[in-house]
Amino acid sequence: MRITNQMITGNSLRNMQKSMNEVNRRTQQMTSGKKISQASEDPVIAIRALKLRTTVNQLQQYKEKNIPDAQSWLDISTTSLENIVKRIEDIETYCVQGSTDSFSSDDRSSIIDSLQQLQDMMFGEGNSTYAGRYIFSGFKTDRALTFTETEDTSIYSYDITQHFSATALDTKNVVVDGVDYTNVDAYIDGTATYEQPNPEMVYRLNLAYEGIDDVNNDGTNVFSLSATDANGNGMDLSGFGITVLSTEDADEYYNVGPDDIHVIEETGEIIFGENVYNTLKTAQDIQVDYAKKEFEPSDLRPEHYFDCTQYVVQTDGSVKDIEYTLTEGGQNIYYEVNFNQSLQVNTEGNKIISPDMANDINDLIYALKDLQAAEETQVKLKSMLEDVQYSSDEAAVKQINQMLKDIDVEIAVKKENMQKTFSNNITNFQTYMDQTSAMMSDVGSRMSKLEMISTRVDEQYASFKELKSQNEDIETDATIIDFNEAELVYESALAATGNILTKTLLDYI
């Protein structure tokens, strides 16, 4: 084969170009720190790099965002639950004291205030937030568990459906025709007939709210009471009469016949006659539909607890209605904290702070208020005996003395009722404490699991970062040696090519 100068020149230039490319490749490796800059340089490294980078990015998301968010959510939940337990313990302490009648007359007002404040503080914990989200409100993280001080509650009204089991039926000791000192003059002049107080026990069902309504915002009657038996069949309650009583009918609240049902709007109680109770105590489910229009701060929001329809007055005066249905199985929020691993971060407040808890606290407060009112009536009647207006009137003195005798009996009954109410609630609040403690244990177990996952993610993150570095990054020492070799080869090629290109045809003549 004949070799020409042109062939030698072309081969030399091509080889020198390869040497230049190798120097350029090594230079890029040294300046970028990466093995390749284009996928075409090494497709295997490129494909592996995509997979490893995706894995590292996901692990970084878990490590730096998801896990810390979940940890913070669980930390705040734990703190709130601990505070709720402390408030329950305080109320239980009052229950123990009240069961032995350790309260003096002067203490009762402050204890009433303390119980209300404890309820407000406890329910306020249900409105705890993390990053602007309410942590105890299930999926409705934009909505507090209770109504708050900053809300205009006047724009809300609800139609509520509340379900009870027969075990929710309980008894209440009341005094019918209690002593009322404001009617003394009417009793004396004969314009009113004095009735002696009559202690009675009534059967009741306590609704979730006080100040209920039997009609909704458009005047439609929504109150109804129905029941089903153990076989799921509807029970016939048509023979029982339902009467809705407002504050003007307070004297008739607990004066109920055997076939009567009294709905007390003020207290949210349904009082049953004996025949009604005997029928309902065998029920599998008791359903009560009612309306609620006026809410106070710390009132539980119905949409977190019941199937209901919310009516909201808009700025233009129109009314928007929204239906809420409780989700079967709860409203658990999960965070993905590792590959194919999710962790529940929320705790539902309706499993901790319940309408029953609010009713029990209200029962304690009402028991104290009833006894306090009776004692105030006693003081007022005694002061009347010292008033010349009455002390000089034999009939007045006789009437007041009779009322004082009766008020002593009423005070004894109400004191016994107060002790019984506080005593019964010792068990109730121990149950609430057990439930809350169980929730704390559940949150604690999730925190322990999260810590183990976090440790595993840290290890995985470090491992995959190392694999990514091994796949993509150069070894500096080896690359420097390779660069020097490539540079030496290039310089040699440059010298040789330069030497060849200086030759001409005259050199061979």
Image: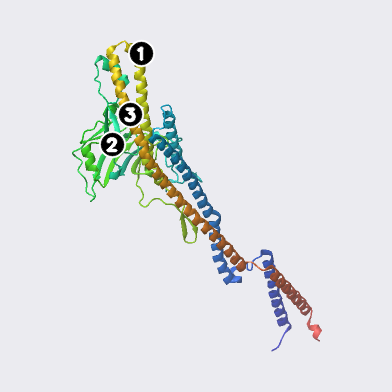
Check contact, mark 1 vs mark 3: CB within 8 A. Answer: no
Residue type, mark 1 in image: Asp
Q: Disc 2 vs disc 1: which is toward the camera?
A: 1
Identify the image quadrant of residue 430: top left
Q: Is residue 375 visible?
A: yes
Task: Calculate the distance from the C-alpha at mark 2 to the C-alpha at mark 3.
Answer: 25 Å
Q: How far apart are marks 1 and 3 (CA)?
A: 26 Å
Q: Are marks 2 and 3 in contact (CB under 8 Å)?
A: no
Which residue is more in the foreground, 90 or 440?
90
Against 91, is 2 above or below? below
Residue denoted by label 1: 387
Which type of secondary structure does the marked residue at label 2 adopt? Answer: strand
Spot occupied by residue 14 in the image (x, y as percentages of width and height): 69, 77
Q: Where is residue 244 in the image (x, y as percent from the top left)?
A: 26, 33
Q: Is residue 258 left or right of residue 489?
A: left
Depth check, front residue: 306 or 413? 413
Q: Mark 2 points at which residue?
A: 270
Locate residue 317 relative to residue 280 in the image: left or right: right
Q: Mark 3 points at which residue?
A: 412
In-image side of 474 versus 166 (left or right)? right
Residue 58 location, x and y as percent? 53, 60
Question: Within 10 Å of the Cα at label 1, are there few (<14), some (14-19), or many (20+) other Cα atoms?
Answer: few
Q: Please give the label number shown on residue 168.
A: none
Q: Is mark 3 on a helix, strand or loop?
A: helix
Q: Position of residue 371 (x, y in %)?
A: 36, 28
Q: Earlier in the sequence, mark 2 or mark 3?
A: 2
